[in-house]
Image (tube, rainbow, N blue to C red):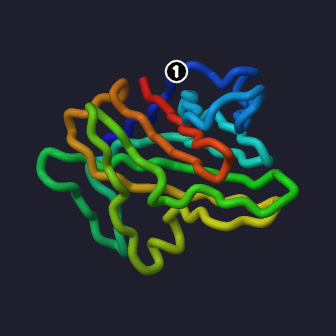
Amino acid sequence: MNRRQVLTAVGAGLSGGIAGRLSPVQNGATKKRDIRTVQIGETATLKGGIHITVKEVEFKDQYVKLGSAVTPTKGKQFAIVSVETKNKGKEKHELPRAITLKLKANGKSYSTTSYTGSEYTRYQYRGGQSKPGAIRDGELRFEIPKSVSQSELTVQWTYTELNRPVVIRWRGQ
């Protein structure tokens, strides 16, 4: 049975609106983390023209891998996170890698599950070094407890390429 729940969103938008700018150290600020929360479906824009969007999160009881249905461990479900990143700047930038995106719920962090072969090429989100104009999109798959509700779910990315770390959280409702 495929159960689909697309997360909508809660949380505060970035200052200056959805496409507000997250900037590194300004006006004598320290190198503390800059933590921002946006809604799933909204784009976070960083200095240098990096745009990051968690487009949606779907919960599924199974998925098809190379023609065969795969089900999660008993008592768990899959959370499929659709991600898009863009380098709209004028320089090369490091876009978030799959390993740097975490799914958090109930005080626990979850890492992505493996993609293999043609499935990896077709679906897996891959970040990394990007030239100006680069767009990377795909999905990340997590296995999480069935008891996790939408209101407890957060997709988090920590970006350390600027003068101070920036943590972006996309919240579900």
For disc 1, the neighbor class at 10 Å (few under 14, some 14 to 19, many from 20) is some
Rendered-image quadrant of the C terminus: top left
131 sits to left or right of 71: right
**Tag 1, which secondary structure?**
loop
Q: Which of these two is toward me, 3 or 54?
A: 54
Closer to the camera in the image, 99 or 119: 99
Measuring from the top left, give residue 145's x and y in whole percent.
21, 42
The residue sitting at 67% across, 67% down in the picture is: 129
Q: Is residue 76 above or below residue 32?
A: below
Give residue 76's position: percent from left, percent from top.
20, 46
Q: Residue at x 83, y 52 (%)?
A: 89
Reading the image, the residue beneath label 1 is 11
Q: Residue furthest toward the right?
A: 90
Residue at the spot 51% in from the left edge and 34% down from the top edge: 170
Left or right of 139? Residue 150 is left
Residue 120 place in picture, x, y as percent: 47, 72
Please tell me which residue lies in front, 48 or 5: 48
Residue 127 image-quadrant placement: bottom right
Q: Nearer the viewer, residue 129 or 141?
A: 129
Rendered position, 169 above or below 138: above
Q: From the viewer's perspective, is residue 168 above or below residue 138?
A: above
